[in-house]
Amino acid sequence: NLFDSRLDIEQTAYLFWLIQKKCIRFKSYAIQEF
């Protein structure tokens, strides 16, 4: 059970990193537009 929760945490961290990466890319695009 502990292993499952650890896997969940890793998946959540990966998703958070992915969203953060997309946000940074979006911000850089917005800066180029304006």
Image (spheres, helix red, strand yellow):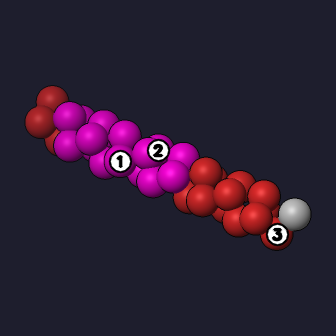
What label sits on residue 19 in the rendered view?
Answer: 2
Q: Residue at x 20, y 43 (%)?
A: 28
- The segment highlighted magenta reads 14-30
Tell me if residue 18 is in the magenta stretch.
yes
Residue reaching furthest left? 32
Q: Is residue 34 visible?
A: no
In the foreground, 1 or 32 = 1
Q: Is residue 27 visible?
A: yes
Q: Please identify the quadrant where the C terminus is shown.
A: top left
Q: Please tell me whether mark 3 or mark 2 is closer to you in this view.
A: 3
Q: Residue at x 12, y 36 (%)?
A: 32
Q: Tell me the residue that label 1 is attached to.
A: 21
- Mark 2–mark 1 CB contact (< 8 Å): yes
Q: Position of residue 8 (x, y in %)?
A: 71, 55
Q: What is the three-letter code of the residue carrying label 3? A: Leu
Tell me if residue 8 is in the magenta stretch.
no
| 3 shown above or below 34 | below
CA gap between label 2 and label 1 equals: 5 Å
What main secondary structure does the magenta stretch of the protein show? helix
Question: Badge 1: few (under 14), some or many (20 or more) residues near its Cα, within 10 Å?
Answer: few
Residue reaching furthest right? 1
Q: Position of residue 1 (x, y in %)?
A: 87, 63
Compare marks 1 and 3 and give the one earlier in the sequence. Answer: 3
Q: What is the three-letter code of the residue carrying label 1? A: Lys
CA gap between label 1 and label 3 equals: 29 Å
Q: Tell me the residue that label 3 is attached to.
A: 2
Question: Badge 3: few (under 14), some or many (20 or more) residues near its Cα, within 10 Å?
Answer: few
